[in-house]
Image: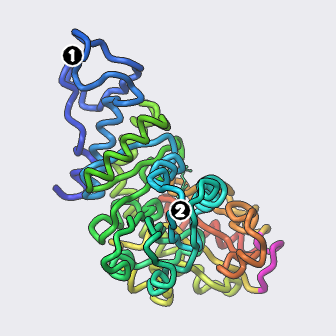
Amino acid sequence: MKFATKAIHAGQEPDPTTGAIMTPIYQTSTYVQAAPGDHKGYEYARTQNPTRTALETNLAALENGNFAYCFGSGMAATDSVARMLLPGDEVIATNDLYGGSYRIFTKVFARYGIKFIFTDLSDASNLKKHLNDKTKMIWVETPTNPMLNIIDIAEIKNQMGSSSPLLVVDNTFASPYLQNPLDLGADIIVHSATKYLGGHSDVVMGAVICKDAKIAEQIKFFQNSCGAVPGPHDVFLVLRGIKTLHVRMDRHCENGMKIANYLVNHPRVDRVYFPGLPTHPGHAVAAKQMKKFGGMMSFSLKGDNYNDALKVLTSTHLFSLAESLGGVESLIGHPASMTHASIPKEEREKTGVVDSLIRLSVGIEDADDLIKDLEQALAK
Ligand SMILES: *Cc1c(COP(=O)(O)O)cnc(C)c1O
């Protein structure tokens, strides 16, 4: 089955009792048993819920995996994967990681004697410098936030050689429509379903997807033991969102390309970070491992002045000033003071997060209207 068909049908049969075409929201905490242990595969809703099973089956299909597990947030999904680590283990992670992932690694898991090494994995040869027999996990995010760096997933796998750490890819920015890391050699995929999968800025959820049954067994164990499961209504919203994922993503990508080309030619804009531009250092790898280039981008202003950026950020009408990304509506954000405020100025500027850097999550509105909105804001 091709992607669009899987998005709409995988995991979703008409309800056997009524024929309801939409998977019902099984708002129940428990299931009646005919005799002790004699049940229909569902015992208690932390462990199993039919609405959640539908979404998990769907997500496994979209990522070409065999198993998927849903969590109450993207961070809860990340948490469950990191729980596979033991004291003494080492993790090599990309240096411009999602802020929340950086926080859970350095402030939560580091306390249990797990060592995290952050390095620029957009140059895959950096991996070898840190790889040793304690390395148990490689953590990659591509494209990265907010600099839109591209990491060559297949090349990272190649650089790992015969060593066997788990390669984890946070696929939130690309979504399964644009990129399928398991096909490129990854062992585990993490998603914040809050973003493109849900797609309508109305739900917080996460997911873990894998092929290997032994990995799946551990993730399932943590999902049930630690209990960070999503409720059935939220699951329903993500199932519903995914039905239009491919259509939305096509428009996000189309609008993203138009806006990047507009910004590149604007006299006040200094640099544009968008993997769809041939001048982007990761363009060739993105063209190889992604179907299209997505709707996320960042740009800086000439003169790099915070007040200039502030003027733009508070002058757009269609782009709303907010954290998050991946919804149908366009958002604008200021990484230096919002998502990356906890990182010292010197550190963040090293990775390109300067005072005038502005991040866009380009929505699926009319591209001409979005460009007009940026035009009037940049004229202020
Ligand atoms: C938002 C995000 C997360 C965290 O997901 P939540 O659903 O907010 O917990 C993780 N990784 C990336 C890349 C994200 O954008």
| Rendering quarter of residue 356 | bottom right
Q: In this view, does 122 lie above or below 380?
A: below
List the residue tagged with mark 2. Answer: 88
- Whole-percent x, y for residue 43 in the image: 32, 22
Residue 331 visible, this orientation:
no
Instruction: Residue at 69% x, 62% y: name it.
Output: 316
Query: Residue, x 78% and y 74% (percent of image)?
Result: 345
Count of marks placed on residues: 2
Q: Nearer the viewer, residue 174 or 135?
A: 135
Work out which residue is located at the far top of the displayed protein and give it.
35
View extreme (left): residue: 1
Residue nearest the viewer, comparing 50 with 78 = 78
Label 2 sits on a secondary structure element that is loop
- The magenta segment: 303-309
Determine which residue is flagged by label 1: 38
| Separation of marks 1 and 2 at Cα, in angstroms | 43 Å
Residue 12 visible, this angle: yes
Rendered location of residue 291, percent (x, y): 33, 71
Q: Residue 162 appears at what percent x and percent y?
A: 30, 77
Q: Residue 351: x percent and y percent?
A: 65, 79
Q: Please check the rendered image and state whether residue 175 is part of the magenta-colored stretch, yes or no.
A: no
| Quarter of the figure with the N terminus | bottom left
Which quadrant of the figure has residue 249? bottom left
Three-letter amino acid code at disc 2?
Gly
Which residue is painted at 30% across and 57% down in the image? 63
Q: Quick one: 201 or 194, which is closer to the camera? A: 194
Q: Which amino acid does label 1 sit on?
A: Asp
Quarter of the image with the C terminus is bottom right
Foreground disc of the pair 1, 2: 2
